[in-house]
Amino acid sequence: MCVSFAFGQVARAQEAITTPYAGSFDDAVFAVENAIIDHGLKVDHISHVGEMLARTGQDLGATLEIFKAADVFLFCSAVLSREMMTDDPMNIAHCPYNLFVAETEKGVVIGHRSYPQGAMQKVQSLLAELTAQAAQQ
């Protein structure tokens, strides 16, 4: 009989790159959606993470409010995606791209994840541009 034990690494979040937003959560959501659309991209899905955490927190007996509100916008650029996956088909792991809006007791932020060096930096540049545009609205 062979018994093996695998000890995995602790899961850690990728670095989030955030920009403070001076307005309300709802205004930030509107600004992010407009920035995405203004670049000729289509929002595929909006994940209401804040609502999900509040709902499941009640079910689990959790009392900590993680976010006052939080949404994640999922979208893709066919041009960039094709280029990224031509460079390395495993860049599919980074698709779809996303921007998030989150409100905590510290305020509202707009952000995105940090991508690895190389070809994915073009995607990170797009996300930074969209974030900056939304933050100025």
Image: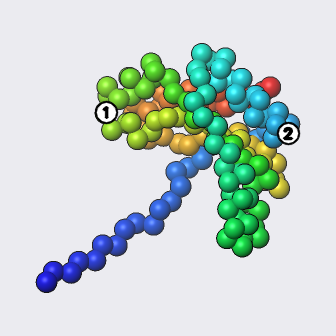
Q: Do we see residue 73 in this rendering?
A: yes
Seen at 38% across and 28% down, the residue is 84
Please tell me the numbered disc located at residue 24.
Answer: 2
Crowding at label 1, few (<14), some or many (≥20) Cα neighbours within 10 Å?
few
Q: Do we see residue 22 in this rendering?
A: no
Seen at 46% across and 35% down, the residue is 95
**As drawn, which residue projects farthest toward the front?**
59
**As drawn, which residue projects farthest toward the right?**
23
Quadrant the N terminus occupies: bottom left
Disc 2 to disc 1, C-alpha distance:
39 Å
Seen at 56% across and 43% down, the residue is 113
Q: Amino acid at mark 2?
A: Ser
Query: Image check: 46 left or right of 82?
Result: right
- Provide residue 4's location: percent of width, then percent of height: 23, 77
Residue 136 placement: quadrant = top right
Q: Secondary structure at mark 2?
A: loop
- Provide residue 2's location: percent of width, then percent of height: 15, 80
